[in-house]
Structure formats: structure tokens, C-alpha cells
Image: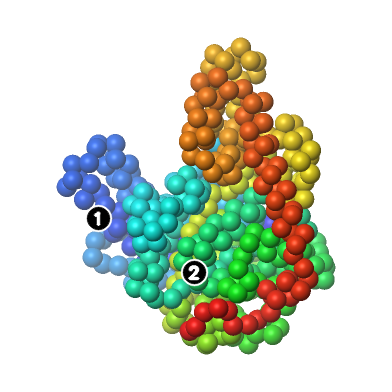
Amino acid sequence: MSNRQNCDSGSLSPLELYERVTTQGDKVRSLKAAEAPKDEIDTAVKLLLSLKLMYKATTGEGYKAGSPPTDFTPINNAPTLAEDDDFVDPWTVQTSSAKGVDYDKLIVRFGSSKIDKELINRLERVTGQKPHHFLRRGIFFSHRDMNQILDAYENKKPFYLYTGRGPSSEAMHVGHLIPLIFTKWLQEVFDIPLVIQLTDDEKYLWKDLTVERAYEYAVENVKDIIACGFDINKTFIFSDLDYLGMSPGFYKNIVKIQKHVTFNQVKGIFGFTDSDCIGKISFPAIQAAPSFSSTFPQIFKGKEDIQCLIPCAIDQDPYFRMTRDVAPRLGYPKPALLHSIFFPALQGAQTKMSASDPNSSIFLTDTPKQIKTKINKHAFSGGKDTIEEHRKYGGNCDVDVSYMYLTFFLEDDDKLEQLKQAYTSGALLTGELKKVLIETLQPLIAAHQERRKQVTNEMVKQFMTPRKLAFEF
Ligand code: TRP
């Protein structure tokens, strides 16, 4: 679907790159001043050098402190990907490493910021809540402007949450729960409005589906989303095929975005080619628009300046780099972002899961028996071939999919750490580790199925009706 040759790995504007170099330079200086450990300084210097190289590749000129680039038009197709680099865009995730994508490199390439201890501590301080285990374990690992959001929260300035889901099939798998579980947590912690977009139009454009079928999938997926426990008084869920036709606010923002992004820019960001249909080429504006509060006049009383926070998997970042690039030109605030790593396929972390391969993932509709069989049969193991070798050398948690899944779903930090040590030392066998995962997932999925059963058509309709939420603006 995507075109590698055409795809610019960074897609950062010269100005954004310039800002990254400046910030990194400051960081190196302060590390040196603080006489930080040598390896820490070396890592920071390395990053600074690679950012400077990217700046030069993009602008054609060397970085000069104090003189930002004057031409802000991003130059496409530079810098290019090295052969062994991971490839990540909204449609393809590829890496040659069994450990999965190198996320630190991705942060540099995408120009986002790492969610470090300092930010997590600040979040805890400001909200008074224990940080979610997705934060503590680096599952949400990268962000843009999260400090601004915490400033807003401290100053009692309003903001809202936006996330979404592409309904490519009826069946959702456990990986799809990650952003939803985290968004629900954020909604509870901050007590703010949430909008959830179902891009049935996107799936119609990219997949072999009728419009009617795409919409049906959207409604089925909405039931799973509702089953995650979102507050009906604080959440608006919409299908593009549905809401676009009834919301002038939404459409006005789409055309505003379309006017400010060129074909060249989306080619650079998404790898579109001349033979892609024009629906695809203009779609990014539709995913961008909900980042602006005026897309939802019924919720925000027409206010245009309420900032948005978007939790999503990192592969969605290209949409929001584009959004952040146009926002100032429209006089809107840039959305802030929280990025998650990918949920690995049962077969290993080289790729993200696919809803079309039933054995690559655990579905929300799987029975306890199916869960057990799939994990026992298909979950890639970091254990050794024989019990003797395993006892002697131990297993490798870095590539073991059962262990990875437990980092997502086993909330107890101490238990997780014990499992890691026992597995690494060889005391715990693969079959035993798998058993823990099976016993973690079976009740979790059964509970989800129970909650989904309680979701009525009437509830779906309510969630999907454009309306005021329980907040005054
Ligand atoms: N394009 C996303 C997908 O295919 C769906 C989506 C739309 C989304 N808007 C979003 C995801 C905002 C995260 C945040 O799954």
C-alpha cells in the first residue's frame, strides 16, 4: 500500500529539525556542566550529531545556532532510510529485529520526545494519580507537547482527548485495546471530553470493502469500544461516513486543512503516488480535523482554541505531524500526542498484528480454549530448545512474545519482575510462562465479552449522537 521509495523517513519541517538540534545542543551543554556520566554525554552527543546531519540533508545547509531556516517548506524524500532501518507508516510496520522496532531511533526520526522519568513524575505530581503501567513500562514511550497539557491542567485550562480506530473488520484483537484502555484512564484522571473517530471512509478507500460494509464494521467496533467502559456523558463516538454528512463544523475544518497542505507534502509524508486515488490523497485532512475543537461545535460551543491530546500508536504520527504543521496557519492550537509502541503479533515483534490473520493475534471474541491453544501453539518463545539447555542458559524475555504480552496485561509489577528473573535464569520454563499469560488473558477477555453483551443498540445510538457532553465551555 505504501511506497517505500517515496516515503520520507523524517517528514520534519526544517524549522522542527532546527528546534530539535537547538534543544539537543542545550541538553548536551547541561549534561557536560553537570558532569554527567560519560556514556550519557556520549549518547546525547551522538543524537545531536545525527540531528545535525538530518538538518543538513533536509535544508542543504549546516545548522547555525541562532539562525533558524527561512524557507519552511519541507523538502520531500530527504533524508532517506538506510537499508537496515525500521520502516513505520500508518499501513506498514517492518523491522528485521526480533526485539521489534528500535523505538529510540524512531523518536529521533519522527522528532518526538521520549516520555522520561521526569515527565512521568510530573504527571504523578500534577494529577495525584499513580502513573498507568503503560507509562511505567514504556508502552506509551513518546510524546509531543505533553508538558503543555500538564501546564493547562495545572492552570485549570480546558483540553480534550481524541483517539480513533480504523474499522477494517468486525473482529478486534487485544492489541486494539491498548490505546482504548489508556484513553479511558486518561479520561478518568483528567475528567475531560473524549471524541473517538471511526475511519470507515479510510477503510473503504484502502481495502476491498463496500461503503455499507465499512459502516457496519464501524458500528460493531463501537460496541467493543463502549465495552471498554467509556463514560457516556463525556464521550462522543462518530463514524466519518455518518458524522461528516451532518456536521458543517467538521467539513469546514477539512477544507481548511485541504487548502493548506499540498500534494507534494502528503506525498512526502505518506508515500502517495500519482496513481493513488484522490480519496486517499485527501483522507489525511479527515483524520486531522478532529484535532481541532471547532469540529465539534455541539461539545465546545463553537470554541476554536481548546487544545487536544491524542493517544495513539506511533504509526499514526504522520497524520498528526501534518496536523501540527497546518494548525498555526489556521490559527488553531497544535494537538499534543502520546505515542505507544506496537502490540506484537503472536509470531514475534517483527511486525504489528493483523486482523486478517486469525493466528497472529488473540481476538476479543476468542473462547478460553482458543486463547489457550493459540498461545501454546503460536506465541513465539524466547526459551531454549530443550529443558536442559533452558535450565542452563535461561530464556530471553526481549524476544519472548508471552512475556511481552504480560508487560501489557499483567498489572502487578512485582509479579512481572519475578517472572522475568525466573525466566531469564532458566528456573521458569516457556510452558509455565505461557500458562501465566493464558490465565491472565482468559478472564480479561471473558469480562470484556460480558460487558459487550450489555451494550444495547440504544447505547450505541446515544454515544454516536452529536450532542453536548457533561462539560460547560
Ligand atoms: N487511522 C487509524 C486506524 O487505522 C484510526 C484513527 C483515526 C486514529 N483517528 C485517530 C487512531 C486518532 C488514533 C488517533 O486505526
Label 2 SS: loop
Q: Is residue 327 above or below residue 415?
A: below
Q: Residue at x 72, y 71 (%)?
A: 459
Q: Residue at x 55, y 61 (%)?
A: 183
Res 128 quadrant in image: bottom left
Q: Quadrant of the N terminus?
A: bottom right
Q: Are dots 2 and 1 in contact, CB under 8 Å? A: no
Colour logic = rainbow
Residue 26 disc label = 1
Residue 366 visible (yes or no): yes
Ligand 1 placement by image quarter: bottom right
Residue 331: percent from the left, percent from the top?
43, 82
Q: How many marks?
A: 2
Q: Nearer the viewer, residue 273 or 238?
A: 238
| Disc nearest the viewer among 2 and 1 | 2
In the displayed structure image, the side of residue 181 where residue 76 appears, left or right: left
Q: Amino acid at mark 2?
A: Asp
Residue 310: percent from the left, percent from the top?
52, 65
Q: Residue at x 52, y 83 (%)?
A: 300
Q: Nearer the viewer, residue 164 or 364?
A: 364
Res 219 quadrant in image: bottom right
Q: Nearer the viewer, residue 428 or 379?
A: 428
Marks 2 and 1 sit apart, C-alpha to C-alpha, by 35 Å
Q: Label 1: few (<14), some or many (≥20) within 10 Å?
A: few
Residue at the spot of label 2? 191
Residue 54 visible (yes or no): no
In the displayed structure image, the side of residue 467 where residue 223 appears, left or right: right
Q: Amino acid at mark 1?
A: Asp
